[in-house]
Image (cartoon, rainbow, N blue to C red):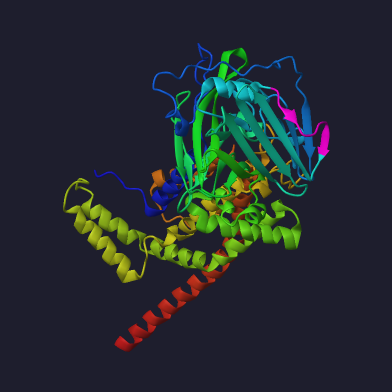
Amino acid sequence: MAKKELSTEVRVLLAFAISFVILIASQRLLVKPSPPAQETASEPVPAAEVAAEKPGEITPTPDLPTEPVQGISEQEITVEGDLYKVTFSTQGAVVKNWELRAYKDVAGNPLELVNPEAAAQHGFPLSLWVAEEPLRREINSGIYVASAEGHLTAPVTLTFDYSSGGTVVRKQFSFTPDSYVAEVKTEVVRNGQLLSHGLAWPAEFGDEHDIVQQNLQASVFYRGPEKVEHLKPDSEEGSQAEASGNFPFAGIEDRFFTATVLAAEGGLRVTAYRQILQLPEEKTRPSIGVVVGSGNSTKNDLRLFVGPKALDVLAAVDRRLPEVVDYGWFAFVAKPMFLALRWIHDHAVSNYGWAIILLTIAINFLLFPLKIKSLRSTMKMQKIQPLIKAIQEKYKHLKISDPRRQEMTKETMDLYKKHGVNPMGGCLPVLLQMPFLFGFYKVLVVSIEMRGAHWLWWISDLSAPENLPVKILPLLMCGTQFALQKMSPMPMPDPRQQKIMLMMPFMFLFFFWSLSSGLVLYWLTGNLVGIVQQVYINRTEMKHLIEERQKAKSGKKKTAQAKD
């Protein structure tokens, strides 16, 4: 006996579920921790600068010293604006803390973008990178003379100067109180000559909760000729990837925040490199660092944006900067959905949870006419099921590889055509929902407005899963999915296919269990709207079906009378 084939509806649903799993997996950068390093990790040298050294002469660099040199004590200087609080150290003129005051971490404190463990092992943000390793050690560990000290309030320009032997370094930072952008100027002089150098964020940028709890690493990017590109070094420690050109900006980002260097003129050169962070109990974690330098190479005159990846904030800095918010393959759906969601939030409900519900209702009602059309196609399919089964019985003795099975396909398609049935008609609602679901997933993953967005009392972050041992929304979603499925027509007499369909709600429960509560809320709301729509459809379409049958019966009577 020939093996029974899955119906079109079942195959589409399975493809939908598998596609959704693949989409989620592709968004998560899951890198297995490397074993503890046996030797001291070396500081990577940007690829653009390796040419200055002879091959084979690059030696491992010990960690930067933690004690001040030359007997001069280290001092910390804080610059505070309306949006940020930045703490500099005079040792290396580097950043020890960079807080964003408008955003909170999981403990409710201002969000810290600098990981102190990573910085202690691999270097602090805004350290300088030069090709010569001893000089690099010197200028990143020496004590600088600052133009001011203590606690400073923006607007302010803070200058750090270092001079020792034939080495002279100047680093200047200018801040304004209500902007995430700082002006950065740097020079490195050795024996009277300006040296090529870059500005570094050596390891781990962004929200540590995302890094530790969700395994989400930062990534390095640059704006190429047509779009934002990402540099991806190999997984081995010390591996590098570099690019240079007339790039308007480049930097490092996590999913909600970025440190982006914008070129004044002459483009940029950027290097990404892999680091390994040593953790307690001999554990390790991979990390990404970045070095960005001016295309001028010997003088850096740059703008540095350190802040949220909010479209309006980014656009105010540079019209192309919003491109760092990556909506992925479904940007054509995701970005309009986000803009609609934000409009509802700003003008109607002031809560993103309720905005998700209203947007979902609107989308489902826009698709409602197509759903009715799909249902009618499904009901027509139910009517001709006995005829389809008869065709299948006729050819069931043939193997799947038998060419004569093409005749079965032809007879089936002729039957569809005769009765005006579209075999894909019942799949239309699922197919239409796919881009909306994938697009909305990206909205929740990359839109900073979703971060920390509250809904009901137990949901404090719509971009994260529910923080409960037993998650309420996924269970409600599973229940409503099952109810909706039972209410909807299922033209599949095959018990095996019915079992697959009955398993679908539980498959979705498994998929959605650890996903963001906002995405589960979107699907749950869609199920509830679908149930209401299905009640209406079942009533009106049943009435429509009865009327059609009555017309058919009256037509048969008239034909019989005419024959008499």
557 shown above or below 310: below
Q: Which residue is drawn at 62% across and 50% down?
A: 524
Q: Where does the image place residue 300, in percent across and percent down from the top left?
A: 59, 40
Q: Which residue lies furthest to the front in this view?
A: 192
Residue 285 in the image: x percent, y percent?
56, 23
Residue farthest along the left direction in this orientation: 403
Q: Is 393 left or right of 33, judged from the image as shown?
A: left
Magenta stretch secondary structure, dominant: loop
Is residue 460 found inside the magenta-colored segment of the image? no
Q: Is residue 253 above or below residue 530?
A: above
Residue 425 versus residue 213 in the image, above or below: below
Q: Is residue 168 visible?
A: yes
Percent of width and height locating residue 530:
58, 58
Residue drawn at (67%, 38%), measured in percent from left and top? 466
Residue drawn at point x = 59 percent, y = 53 percent: 527
**In which image quadrant can residue 427 be found?**
bottom left
Q: Can residue 479 be seen in this view?
A: no
Q: What stretch is highlighted in magenta?
A: 143-152
Q: In this view, does 455 lie to the left or right of 494?
A: right
